[in-house]
Every structure is written in structure tokens, then in C-alpha cells.
Image (cartoon, coloured by chain):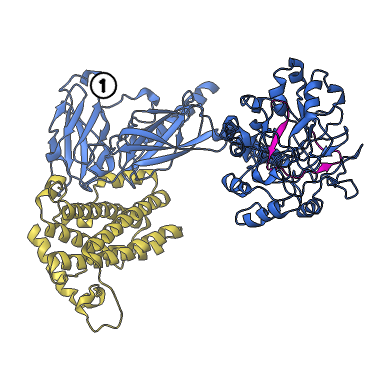
Amino acid sequence: MHTMAVIQRSVWALLLWPSLLTVSMPLDCKEEQGSLSGCTSISQEKLLDRVIHHAELIYRVSEESCSLFEEMFLPLPLRLQISQAGYTCITKALPLPSSKSEIQQISDKWLLHSVLMLVQSWIQPLVYLQTTMDRYDHAPDMLLNKTKWVSDKLISLEQGVVVLIKKMLDEGTLATTYSEQGLYQSDVQPEMLESVMRDYTLLSCFKKDAHKMETFLKLLKCRQTDKYNCP
Amino acid sequence: MCYIITYILFTVSVLPLCVVLLLFPSPSSHSLASLPLCHCLSAPLEPHFTECISREQETFRCWWSPGSYHNLSSSGALRVFYLKKESPTSEWKECPEYIHSNRECFFDVNHTSIWVPYCMQLRGENVTYFNEDDCFTVENIVRPDPPVSLSWTLLNISPSGLSYDVMVNWEPPPSADVDAGWMRIEYETQYRERNTTNWEALEVQPHTQQTVYGLHIGKEYEMHIRCRMPAFTKFGEFSDSIFIEVTEIPTKESTIPLTLILVLGILCILILIMLVVLTQQHRLMMVLLPPVPAPKIKGIDSELLKKGKLDELNFILTGGGMGGLPTYAPDFYQDEPWVEFIEVDGEDGDSGEKEDNRASDTQRLLGLPHPVSHHMNMGCSNAISFPDDDSGRASCYDPDLPDQDTLMLMATLLPGQPEDEEASFDVEERAPASSERSLVQTQTGGPQTWVNTDFYAQVSNVMPSGGVVLSPGQQLRIQESTLATEEETQKGKEGEESKETEEEKQKELQFQLLVVDPEGSGYTTESNVRQISTHPQPVETKPAATMEDNQSPYIHPDSPQSQFFAPVADYTVVQELDSHHSLLLNPPPATPMPVGYITPDLLGNLSP
């Protein structure tokens, strides 16, 4: 499973190679000496703090969106059904640690890469969510605004993580936004209920993963400041 | 019949409802339902899970209940199985750790995964009781432990003294790994008054301190705090309560009027003091800064007596109309910067005081009514004219002397009685002016005759016969005007009075010495001096001469002055006291008749 995932990922990376240039923005001004825009570089600690702050906000807004959606669109029975479905989330396949003990065993590098993977795998689905939600008749503006906001913030989060990787790990740019677009490229207009259920699943999964992202980043920060007491 | 139909209808309508409700119990997407809503038809309660809780997002526990199946309540009758949906091929596994006493299944760190869905089921012998409600992810069942180490501090008290603010501090629960960032925790503080039931809940916030505003003084408050993860819904247990009470504290208000009163009191006292000072300025000045005796001579301007003008003074004294002072006068002056003068003045109403006993003495003292003016110089200069009597010296060093307003006749007047010098004097205080100066006046002739001398003469000695010997014998001025003030002194007469009865002393008058205060200042001006000098003749007293305020205490030119001592005699003998107890000097017809002492100068003038 792991190899399959890796292959899948690499395929997507190759396919989406051109998007790299457009998506990734130069955040590190040191590389562009002759740039006209006077951008200032940022220290690693501050960048990490900002990234964590982003992740916290994203999680909070996603939770609010999920609750809103639940109230609006899901009757009581449906919620039960979905909860026992077990969250067939899209990121299930990602090789991510799922407990504190597991996290303790992985390195900083891997932790950061996990975050990046998560972020990158959610960008597209959220964009897709925007389109489907627009089709709803009674979608409240607040919900739409929140999902839009989350979608935008996720993109900037990804950029931040990329720069962080570059700074912390001295690696080259690896900004690949891949997603399992295949799932969401159906032209068939799904049924309302199905659509609702799918969207709700999406939102719930994203909420979970946002919490995961936030936790990973905080543990990473702990490791940066105090290596001995951190998991 | 109707009843049966209605009953059937009722059951028909109700049954599906119950069935539906049973099949779809109250949904809560991430938590286990506690109990079915509907108990209708008394459906037996299946074994189920009551709750699953994680305290620190690392382990979790689940509790179950046999429900109404009491035969399954024994331990081991029911078994717990869980499914960890990590992969599509996951299987149901049995509870890793049972705690049968609690009917609890504990999942330790190794068996707990976050962000992974778990499903729980109970299995009996052949029956599986599975509730779809019992699926969850661990982060959604986290209920953090309550905070610890609650404490409070008083922030402030309102100005009205009725309410106060309090800051509550605490520590995060030790089980939650907040420092590492594994969990974030938010706190909710609740408080209530001691005997009330409703709790006031404050807003959830992530800091480990909380300010509570608007508590009332005198009331006791109970406070507790609980935790939850941010953006999650489940709170943990409440912490132990702390009790806050602030009793009445004496507020600053009570001190404000006190300070006001103090300030006002001090101000009033200050104003009073100022008033006192302003109104009683003179007296205060007298008390605090008593006037310093300075040399003053009646008839001589005080200016002359200041430093550096001694020559002028000498000139006046020597070359002035009265004749020159003896040569040692300047010396005398130089030695003693201050002198006191006594004026002998005829008293106004003391005629009645004349004693008969003194007649003999006065007779002796009183002689020809030739005015002889004496200048008696009190003070330290006594010694000069008193070669063999040191009585006067004692007075020199008496510190009281300059301070007293009393006239002091020189001790020379009364040899052998120095001790009475001060005590014998009983002088009325003069008008508020320098009164150190007094002139001795002798009265010659009638009771109205006054002798007012501008210059002073020292009474050198008192003759046993009663005469008073004056040294530098000055020309005496007879003052015809009444004197403004009267001073009495017993001094001069004391020597003779010693033989007298005590009445004399009681009368305070041996002879009266009047203090002449022509100008109220005790001494004359230059104009007067000149006047004096131009009239160097003893004035014969005019009867009933009254003293004027502006005083012309000087000899009138028309007074017969046939006899006059052109050269200055050294001394004059006081022959007698007249009825007014004035010294009457015995004017020699042409020259003074010294009895005791005579200088060679005067030898020629002496008439046998």
C-alpha cells in the first residue's frame, strides 16, 4: 500500500509539474537578489509560529463549517449513518502517524513532510467543495464564506510549509499540489442526498486532518525549542 | 365498541413510532447514546456502552452496562470488541484491558490511535450487541482533566467599597501534555454565591488565569473551572471549588474627611498664630528681642554716642555750656559704652508721703535752693569716683542691670549698701521707649523746683553729714517743668534710711528720683543740648513749674542766676532733701563747697 501511494504521488507530481511554477511563490527573498519588490525574509521561528497559527485557524473554521453544514443539511438519521461509515477519508492512504508514540518515533523531516502531504492533498478537494456547495439551494453565505476562506488559507499554509522545509531541512522546492482529482471529476450531477453526504464526509475528514496538521506542527515546534521533553 | 376501535387505532399509530424510535435512537454523530429515548412497550434495554472518554488524548476507556439483561451483569458474560478502522482489512479485536469492577475497558497508549475511527461492540454468548452509535475518533471523546492549584488574588475594590475584582490563577491539568503542544486546552470558569444554585459562567478562554469582576463585599463566592479542547464540544469534570470572600475593609472614604479636618485645623491654627503675631507684634518683639541698652545721654544726640563720634561728644560734654567734664569723663565714657541715667524729679503727689522722720535727713540734704544738677552716672563708672568703695562695682557686673528699667542710683550714694541697689529701686516703668536712661534731678528750693540736668554727674560719696558728693560737678539745670514720669528710688537715701524706720522704706522713697522723659525717649535732642549749653546756669526753680510735653526743661534765661559756677566743680554736696524728697544740693554761693573732696582746680574757688 505504501509503495502504491508513493507511485501515485510521484505520478501526480510529474503531471502537475508545470503548476509548480505558478503555485509556488518566492517567499525567500534571498534567492532573488534583483527583485524589485522589497520583500523581507523571515526567521525560522517566526515562520513556524505563523504556520502553526494558520493551522489552528484553519482547524477552527473547518470545525465551524462542519457544524454549520451538519445543522443545515443533515437530518438526524443521516448523521448517524455517516458517523458509522467510518470516515472513508481521502487521506486514509497516507502513511501518517496516528498516535503520540508513533510520532515520537519519526523524525522532524518526516513530520514536516507529513504535514505537507496533508495540506497538499486537501487543496483540490476544498476547491471542489466550493463548486458543489454553490449548487445547494439553501447554503447560507456564512458557510460558503468559511469554506472559501479555508480553501484560501490552506494554499498559503502550503506555501509556508514549503518554505519551512527549505529552511529547516535545506531541501529543494518540492511544492507539488496533488490530489485525487479523479474522484471529483465526474460530470454526473450527483443526487442531492449523495452530494450532501459526500460533502459532509469531506468536511468531517478535513476537520480531522486539520487537527492532525495542527498537532504535528505544534509537536515540531516543541522539538525545535526543547528536544528532550517533546514527543 | 367505540373504546375498542379507539384503542386499536391508538396502538396502531403509536407502535410504528416506537419502532422507528427504537431503530433510530437519538443521534449524536460522534458520541455514544446513553439510553434509548423511548421506553414504550417496555422494550428490554440491551447491553450498551454508557460512555467512552479519553482524558489526555493518549488513552481512553469505555464503560458498558448490561441494561435490563441482568443475567448478563456478571463479569465475563459480556465481552468488549473494538474495530480500528485503519485499513479496510481491520478486524474486531477484544478489549486489551478489562476492569470488571467498573465494567470498564481500558485502552492504553499502545492501543490508542488518534484520528482513527473506533467502533465498539458488546458480545454475549451468541449475541452481538452493536450500536452504530458507538463509533468515534479519539480526539472527539477527549474530556480533559480539571485544572489544579486554583488560587485567587484581590485586584481592587471599587470606590464605593461595595464590590471588588478578583484574579483567579490555576495550573493546567498535569495529565494533559500542553507544554509539548499535544493538546490545547480552553478553560471555563463558573462561580456562584454560597447558597445559590445558579452558576455564572464566564467565557471560555485559553489562558490559565481569569479576572472576575463585580463581586460583592461580604458575600462568599464559590468558583470552579473545567477544561475542554478548543473547537471541541466535550468539557471535562469541574475542578474542586475555591471559596472567595472579602469582608468589609475600611475604605479610604473614612480617611478622606479625617485628612480634610486635619488640614483645616492646621490652617486655622496657622491663621490664629498669624493674627496673634500681627496684633501683638510689639510685645512679641519685646519678649523675643528685648531692646539692647545703648548709650544714651539726655541732651546729647544718640548719634553722637555711636562709635567714632566720641570726640564730638567729648566736645559737647566738655566744651558745652555746662562746663567741661572732667578729664576722665571721656575715659570713663570709653570704658563703659553704656550708661544709665537717673533723673531726679519732683513727684506730683508724694507730698503727703513726706515723713517726719526724715526731716532731719532731709534737712541735711536740703540746703540752699540752689539748683544743682546732678548727673549721676550709674553703672560701672562708680568705681572711678569711688576710690575706696567698691560697692558700686558690684552693680557693674550685674547682668540684670541693663535689662531693668529701674533707675539705679549709684552705689556711691549709699556707701556700704550695695546690696540694696537693685532691690531698693522700685521704678515704674516708663512709656514704651528706651528707659535705660534716666536723669537725676534734684530739686532745690521749693517743692516745685526741679532740676533737670542734661549732663550727668556722678555722686561720689555721701557725707556722713548727709551731704552727697557729686563728682564731676556739673552745672545743674533746674527743670521747672513737671516731669512726665516719675521714678522713685530708695537708693540714694538708703544709707541714711537705714537709721530710719521701716516706714521709709515702705514708702519707697528716700528721695524721689524722677525720670525725665522730655520727649518720651529718655534723652534729648541736639536742640535741647544746645539750649542747655546756652544756658549754663543753674536755674532757680520756679514755683509751680509745669512740665510741658515738648518740654522746655531748661533753664529760663530770666531766672536769676547770679551765682553760677563758671568753672565746673567736681562735685556738689547734697545738703538736704526737700519736702518732696528731692535732693537739694548745697550750692556754694560762688563756688561749690566741697566737703570731702576737692580738686586743686577748685581750690581757688573755694570760699571758706
* B238 and B89: which is toward the camera: B238
Amino acid type indicated by mark 1? Tyr
Q: Crowdedness of circle 1 by 10 Å Cα count: few (<14), some, many (20+)?
A: few
Residue at image coords 65%, 47%: B326
Q: Is residue B493 magenta?
A: no
Residue at image coords 30%, 59%: A54
Residue at image coords 26%, 57%: A52
Left or right placement of residue B54 versus residue B548 in this view: left
B299 is higher (above) or lower (below) than A38: above
Q: Which residues are magenta?
A: B464-486
Screen quadrant of the C terminus of chain B? top right
x and y, in percent, of residue B29 in the image: 32, 43
B162 is higher (above) or lower (below) than A164: above
Q: Of helix, strand and loop, which mostly describes the magenta segment?
A: loop
Q: Colour in which chain B is shown?
A: blue
Q: Tell me the quarter of the picture where residue B308 sits.
A: bottom right
- Read off the residue under disc 1: B69
In the orientation shown, which residue stands out farthest toward the left? A3
* B389 and B63: which is toward the camera: B389
